[in-house]
Image (cartoon, grey):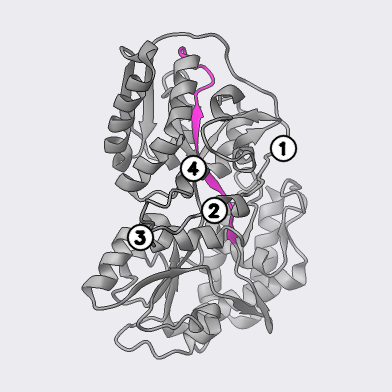
Amino acid sequence: MKNKKILFLAAAMLLGAGSLASCGNGGKGGNSIKVWAAKDDQAFLGQVVEKFKAAYPDYANANIELAITEEPDVPTQLKTDLAASADVFHFAGDQLGELVASNYLYGIPSALTSNIGIEPAVLEAGKVGGNQYGIPFTPNTYFMYYDASVYTAEDIKSLETMMAKDVGDYTYNFGFDIANGWYLQSYFFSAGCTIFGESGEDATKGIEPADKGLEVAKWMWDVYNGPNKDKYYRGPADAQCGISVAACVTGTWSAGTIAKNMTDNGGTYACAPLPKLTIGGHEYEWKSVGDYKHIGVNAVTEAPELAATFAAYLANAESQALRYTLRGTAPTNAETASDDTIEWDASIVAQTEQLNHTFKQPSIYGQQNFWDAATAFGSDLSIAKKADVVDYFDGFNNLITAA
C-alpha cells in the first residue's frame, strides 16, 4: 500500500453532539500534568513527551507523568474522583455528550487545534455547543478482514455469496460478534431504521419503523438457527480469523493478529469494506458506526495551558505518524493521511473506504440501557423459537424506551 494517499477529507464525518455549556478553566496554571493512556500506548507517549519538550522550550522542565488507564475505564475514573484523575486522557466518542454534560471536560482553545492538520469537519466530531472538548485522533469503526486465497474481490461484495462459498480447511466462513451492541446497532441502521428518532436523542422512540426492525430480528435469528448456522462464528472472531475463520468483522486494532494468523496458516491477508446484507429479501449496504476516539483534558486541571497544548500536540501530523509507526493506529490528521512516504497497512485503507458508509451513533444509549439490553436481545435470539422472535423484538424495544 506504499504511496497510497488516504484521503480522510472525503470520508470526514460530521458528528456534532448537540448544544451543551462550556466548562473549561482559564489561565496558565501549573507546570505538571498526568497523562492517561492504554498500556500499549506508553512507549509512544514516552517519545512524544520528549519531542514535545524539545518543541516547546517553555515546557522543557515540565513534569509530564504517564500512567496506564485503558480507554473504556476513563469515564468511570472521572466520575469517581475528577480532581484526582489525569489532566489528559483518551476516550471513546460515544462518551463525549455524557462527559460534557457532567462538566468533566475542558474546552480546548481553537487556537491550539486550528493549525495541527486536522480538517474542520473531523474536528467537528469533538465539539459540543461549538466548543472543542475532544480532539479526534483515530477513527473508531469496523470493516472486514478476509483470506483472499479463499474469497475473490467479487465474492466479498455480498455476505450471502460469502456464506455459499466452499472455504476449504476453514471451519467457519464468517465471524462477527453479533450480539455485541456496538455491532448489533449496525444491522438496524443498514436496513433503514432509526434508533431513538432521527436525532438519536428521543428517549420515547425505539427502533423504527418496527416492521423493518422485526425483519432485522428475524435475520439475526436466522444467523443463529438457519441453514448456515454452522458456518458462522458468532462472537469476537479476532483471534480465530485466519485460523478457523475465513473472514471476520473487527477494527484496525486486530490487524497485527489477523495478518500473522493468515500468513502463518498459508492464507492471503486482505481487508475490505463490509459486504452487503440481505435482510427480509432486500439487499442493503452494511453500514458501520462512524465515530472517533478523542484526546480530552480534565475540566478541573490545575495546568490548563500545558494540558491543552500537550493534548493538541498529541494529535499533530508528526505525532500521528509516530503513533501509526509504533501502534498501527489510523490517523485523523490530513497531513499524516496524505503522506505518500508511509506504507499503509491494508486495514487502514479498508477502514478509510468504510468511513464513506457509516451512521452516527445515538447519544443517549447509556441512559437508555441500550448496551446491556442489546446484548441480552442477541443472546435471547440464539435460543428463541422462530415464532417468538416478534415478542423478543417488542420486549427489546420496550426495554430501551422504558429506561
Marks 4 and 3 sit apart, C-alpha to C-alpha, by 23 Å
Q: Is residue 399 left or right of residue 271?
A: right
Disc 2 residue type (three-letter) = Leu
Tag shown at residue 335:
4
Q: Which amino acid does label 1 sit on?
A: Gly
Can see residue 57?
A: yes
Task: Work out whether mark 4 precedes mark 3 in sequence or the reverse, and give the earlier one.
Answer: 3
Mark 4 or 3, closer to the camera = 4
Pick the front one: 294 or 214: 294
Residue mark closest to the camera, 4 vs 1: 4
Nearer-N-terminus badge (2/4)? 2
Residue 210 belongs to magenta span: no
Identify which amino acid the numbered label 3 is placed on.
Answer: Ala
Residue 310, by quadrant, is top left
Q: Earlier in the sequence, mark 3 or mark 2?
A: 2
> How far from the left and from the top, in percent, is residue 256?
30, 59
Decide: marks 3, 2 in contact (CB < 8 A)? no
Disc number placed over residue 338 in the picture, else none:
none
| Residue 390, placed above or below residue 22 | below
Report which residue position mark 3 lands on.
Answer: 255
Q: Nearer the viewer, residue 142 or 204?
A: 142
